[in-house]
Structures are given as structure tokens and as C-alpha cells.
């Protein structure tokens, strides 16, 4: 497995065998690196440390002590997705999940196990919109979510056993799901990865979309119809039909800018997704939709109007907190050191210490 990790990290760095040899200052030949990757030779501890430094990865990543492997990595939108892009993302996911599993092991926790709220459903291509709508209603019912907007999609999915990672992905990839396989008799762990570069509204839709992929049985569906079904599911899950009708009315001929902005804030969904949802459930017709995109919603397809988080905050709102909470729990209980917590959290020690102790209080003036 060390060989596979070296090869993946090398691709992430965009280096050829000779390029990596040059980065190592000629200390190791390209031929030797090739043998490491094929499993024909095992690098010494000194060579491993040099490789870590040259490739920008941790020693635990190259050593692969947990036997972790990713399966089912599907970027869905494959355009402009290079081997280097894929290697970068796979390396990031593996490094992150290894740290996640480490802290769960320290706390003697079973990794949160995903249990589908309903059995994966086969959808008919001609009826995927209606059936995806019904599926979204069923999931809300099973999870006791009611009909109100979902305040935090990331927290919801983590609570239900899905691990969520916000990562820099190729520009045209909004997100993907994959399975983490471990050596030993452990269940596969589903991971959802979303693109940090996208607005919060788009990330929430992606999370719901990827949830849809886990609940829709793709058997008998062409990829295009599966994607459409997952998109229908996501919109219905975030914006239930009856709740929308109550807020905006069952039939509308005209829409105003401020009303739409207030609705997108209510459902924490993108402006485009909201408009398309209104059209799909018959609240507005095709003509009204087209006019909206030509007038009050002009440019919404390329730029999210009045984003819920500004561009400097990207990835900071509705971000995953479970891993961080577990690290501080272990630190507070004395199960890990401050140095280890900083290593797991990838934060400076003084920042982690401040997170443990809280803001300094001024000394009381006793006279």
C-alpha cells in the first residue's frame, strides 16, 4: 500500500518519476521511485521522510497504517477533471479520514454508521420527477424533519452517519460521494465531499443531491436520468412543495426581486434552484421563468444574488464540526496531547490551546 500512496501523492503534486527524483535532489533515482510504487522495493525510514517533505504529505499517510482505500469516487462532471485533480482530492480525503478515524479510535467510538432512512428506490425514467418528490417526502418523514426549511444540511448528514468534507475541487465539480474501505471487518464509510469554492446555497444543494444518489437505485436508469432524479430530490428535500405553496401561493404570474431573495434566504437555496423549483411544481409557468431570467434574475446563473456568506467566508458557514468536537473532547479528557490535537486539527498549537481554554479574562481588580 505504501507504493500506491506514493504514486497517488506524486500525481497530486503533478510530478513525473524524474520530476520527483529531481525534487529529492537526486538522492533517489526515478527507477527506484518506480520500484517503490510497484511494490518491488520498500523505502527506508529516511527515504520516507524525504518523500513526505517533497510531496507535501504526512508520514502516516504514506505508511497507511489503517489500510484505507477509496472506492466509488465519481466526479460526475468529468469535463476538465485531470488525473492530477483526482489525485489531489483522493489524497485530501484519505488524509482527512485517517485523522478522523484516529480520534474516534482514541475515544473508543464506533465510526458513525450510515443507515439509509428508506431502502434505495428504483425510479422510472419517465416518472423520475414525481417519484423523486415522493422519495424526498418519505425521507423527511422518516427523519422527523417536518415540513420546515432545514437550517443546517451538513449537521443533519453528519448526525445521520455521513461524513462531510469541504475541499477545493476542480471548478466544474460541485461535489461527489465515495466509500472508505478499511482493512478488517469494518463497514464501508460513506463520505460526501463538496466544493469549497461554491457559495453556501450551492453546497447545500450539492449535499442534498449526493444524499439523493445514496437513496436512488441507478439500476435501469441512464446516467442523465439518475442525475435529473437526484436534482429533483435535492430541490424537493430543501423546498417542500406544500411549504412553498403556503409561502408564495399555488399559482403566480409575476414575481418580485425582494420576495425571491427573502425566499432563497428562508430555504437557504440558490436563486436559480428556487426559480426552477417553482416552475417544476407548477407555481409559475415556463414563460414566467424565462421572463424572470431576462429581468429580475438576470445573471443569477453565473453569480449567486445576495449570497448567504461572502466570498471571504467561503466554506466557513455550515461546515462540519463533529471531527473538531471529538478532538477537543479527547484533549479536554487528557487522552491526547496539545501537540497531537494540533497535528490532527492542522492548526497552530496556540490556536488549539485558545480553543480549549477560551478567551483570556482580565484579572479582577481586588482592592
Image (cartoon, rainbow, N blue to C red):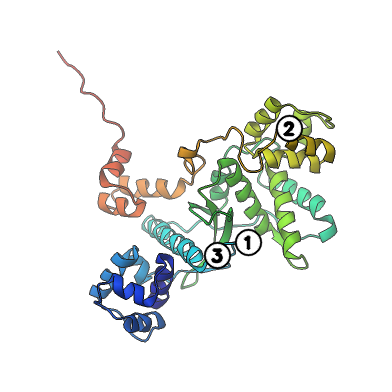
Toward the top, the furthest residue is 367
Query: 123 or 119, which is in the foreground?
Result: 123
Q: Residues within 10 Å of mark 2 (few under 14, many from 20)?
A: few
**Residue 27, image quadrant:** bottom left
Q: CA distance from mark 1 to mark 3?
A: 15 Å
Q: CA distance from mark 2 to mark 3?
A: 43 Å
Residue 258 visible from this viewpoint? yes
Residue 120 visible from this viewpoint? no
Front position among marks 2 and 3: 2
Mark earlier in primary sequence (1, 3): 1
Q: Residues within 10 Å of mark 1 (few under 14, many from 20)?
A: some
Q: Position of residue 182 (x, y in %)?
A: 47, 69
Left or right: residue 351 compared with residue 167:
left
- The secondary element bearing badge 2 is classed as loop
Query: 135 or 34, which is in the foreground?
Result: 34
Q: CA distance from mark 2 to mark 1?
A: 32 Å
Which residue, given by chain and number where applicable, does mark 3 sit on? 179
Mark earlier in primary sequence (2, 3): 3
Q: Residue sitting at 53 percent across and 51 percent down?
A: 195
**Residue 365, image quadrant:** top left
Amino acid at each position: 500500500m505504501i507504493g500506491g500512496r506514493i504514486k497517488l501523492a506524486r500525481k497530486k503534486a503533478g510530478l513525473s518519476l524524474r520530476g520527483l527524483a529531481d525534487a529529492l535532489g537526486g538522492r533517489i533515482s526515478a527507477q527506484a521511485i518506480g520500484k517503490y510504487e510497484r511494490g518491488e522495493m520498500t523505502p527506508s525510514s529516511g527515504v520516507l521522510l524525504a518523500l513526505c517533505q517533497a510531496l507535501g504529505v504526512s508520514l502516516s499517510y504514506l505508511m497507511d497504517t489503517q489500510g484505507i482505500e477509496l472506492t466509488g469516487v465519481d466526479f460526475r462532471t468529468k469535463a476538465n477533471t485531470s488525473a492530477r485533480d483526482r489525485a489531489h482530492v483522493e489524497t485530501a480525503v484519505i488524509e482527512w479520514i485517517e485523522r478522523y478515524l484516529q480520534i474516534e479510535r482514541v475515544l473508543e467510538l464506533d465510526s458513525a454508521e450510515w443507515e439509509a432512512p428508506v431502502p434505495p428506490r428504483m425510479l422510472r425514467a419517465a416518472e423520475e420527477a414525481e417519484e423523486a418528490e415522493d422519495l424526498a417526502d418519505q425521507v423527511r418523514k422518516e427523519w422527523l424533519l417536518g415540513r420546515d426549511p432545514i437550517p443546517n444540511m451538513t449537521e443533519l448528514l453528519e448526525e445521520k452517519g455521513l461524513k462531510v468534507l469541504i475541499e477545493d475541487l476542480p471548478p466544474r465539480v460541485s461535489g461527489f460521494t465515495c466509500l472508505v474501505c478499511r482493512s478488517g471487518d469494518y463497514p464501508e464509510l460513506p463520505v460526501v465531499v463538496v466544493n469549497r469554492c461554491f457559495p453556501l446555497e450551492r453546497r447545500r444543494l450539492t449535499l442534498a443531491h449526493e444524499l439523493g444518489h445514496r437513496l436512488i437505485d441507478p439500476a435501469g436508469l441512464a446516467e442523465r436520468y439518475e442525475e435529473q432524479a437526484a436534482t429533483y430530490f435535492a430541490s424537493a428535500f430543501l423546498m417542500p412543495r406544500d411549504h412553498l405553496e403556503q409561502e408564495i401561493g399555488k399559482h403566480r404570474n409575476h414575481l418580485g426581486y425582494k420576495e425571491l431573495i427573502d425566499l432563497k434566504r428562508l430555504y437557504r437555496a440558490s436563486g436559480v434552484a428556487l426559480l426552477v423549483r417553482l416552475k417544476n411544481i407548477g407555481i409559475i409557468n415556463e414563460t414566467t421563468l424565462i421572463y424572470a431570467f431576462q429581468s429580475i434574475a438576470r445573471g443569477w446563473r453565473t453569480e449567486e444574488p445576495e449570497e448567504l456568506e461572502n466570498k471571504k467566508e467561503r466554506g466557513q458557514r455550515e461546515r462540519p464540526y463533529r471531527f473538531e468536537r471529538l478532538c477537543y473532547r479527547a484533549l479536554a479528557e487528557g487522552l491526547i496531547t496539545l501537540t497531537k490535537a494540533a497535528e490532527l486539527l492542522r492548526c497552530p498549537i496556540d490556536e488549539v490551546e485558545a480553543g480549549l481554554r477560551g478567551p483570556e479574562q482580565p484579572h479582577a481588580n481586588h482592592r
